Amino acid sequence: MIKLLSHLAHVEIAAPDPAASVAFYERLVGVRAIASEGGKTYLRSWGDYYDYSLVISHGAEPALVEMAWRTTSDEALDEAARRIEAAGVAGVWHDSGFGHGRSYTFTGPFGHTMKLFWDVDKYRGEGEFASIFPDRPERRTRHAVGPRFLDHVTVAARDVRGFAEWYRDVLGFRIMAYTVLDEAPITVFGVITTNEKSHDLAVVLDTSQRPGRVNHYAFWVDTREDLLQAADVLMENGVEIEYGPSIHGIGEQNFLYFRDPSGMRIEVNTGGYRNYVPDWQPNDWKPSQGSNNLYRNGAMPMSMTESFPPDAAPSATEEGLHPDTAEEIIADALANPYAKQGRG
Ligand SMILES: [Fe+2]
């Protein structure tokens, strides 16, 4: 298979009060609205190479509307669409979109809508936004979190391995790692990538009946000090830190999680390894090995298992477990994985 996708270009999220969300992102996250059109507001981080990386639109509940990937070429866009349709999924072509050319939009087998395009407008800041450096699309900002660019999306699906394998087989993502519970052979997390990062798409186990849910999406900052300062600024401005700052075992990124006014979870991360191995074989991590927390000393808050839109009707999992049993096992395993297994 030729390489089809290059990287994540933007995400669109729905918020019940888009104006409140836009204000929050501009004031505290430190991204900048460049346009509002057709009920959508387009925002950019200073280092985004294209016009924008975040779109906020109105919705009754916080949700992921779509995630957009840039292909590696115009031919790769056609080939990706061909492969998606050969896999039994019918998408839709559009002649153009805001800031990009023709695109192919489809909804994957677990309900997540993805847009693919090749032609895109490159951003070049002018006036007060012009950088003195040739490679920077815009002058650096240290306003609030001030992320450089968008990093990844973590969705929720009822079959973590099935999700990862579909995106590997159809679109060429590499599968980088899984997390399997200590207590039971339940895969609760997986990371996949289109490039050298540990992941630009990740998936958590969803025990609900709602397809297409998202757990969080993430911005990148350059250094751990930037991340720590971001946490400090958020705290000083009344934004609760949900989890972190700490370091994930899988991917080894420094992480920080908080919520926007709609309740949507945002991550800020930095660091981590680069992996170019084309035939990488994913390892199974256990929570007790520090899959989520490299230092094995901080239990993940249970609120982190909430995905969006909120769960309306819990149901049985793919493993056929009674949902209450599955949820109890997962909750118990994630709440305090180190106590039970020691630090081996
Ligand atoms: Fe993440």
Image (cartoon, grey):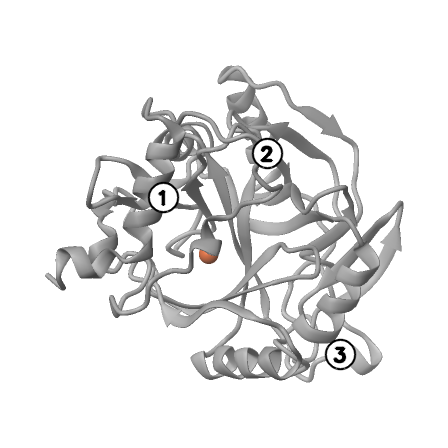
Query: Which quadrant is home to the N terminus?
Result: top left
Q: Position of residue 168 (x, y in %)?
A: 39, 34
Q: Is residue 175 visible?
A: no
- Residue at image location 79% in from the left, 38% down from the top: 96
Q: Position of residue 269 (x, y in %)?
A: 47, 67
Q: Which mark is residue 312?
A: 2
- Residue at image location 32% in from the left, 68% down from the top: 298
Q: Determine which residue is flagged by label 1.
A: 190
Q: Is residue 233 visible?
A: yes
Q: Does the residue tagged 1 have its C-beta within 8 Å of any atom of ligand 1?
A: no
Callout 2 touching callout 1 (CB < 8 Å): no
Judged by depth in the image, the label closer to the viewer, 3 or 2, is 2
Q: Nearer the viewer, residue 313 or 253?
A: 313
Q: Does the residue tagged 2 have its C-beta within 8 Å of any atom of ligand 1?
A: no
Mark 3: which amino acid? Ala
Judged by depth in the image, the label closer to the viewer, 1 or 3, is 1
Nearest to N terminus: mark 3 or mark 2: 3
Marks 3 and 2 sit apart, C-alpha to C-alpha, by 47 Å
Q: Determine which residue is flagged by label 3.
A: 130
Element class at badge 2: loop
Element class at badge 3: loop
Relative to 219, residue 107 above or below: above
Quadrant in the rendering for residue 95? top right
Mark 2: which amino acid? Ala
Q: Nearer the viewer, residue 86 or 24?
A: 24
Counting labels gives: 3
Relative to 126, residue 188 above or below: above
Query: Which quadrant is home to the C terminus?
Result: bottom left
Mark 1: which amino acid? Gly
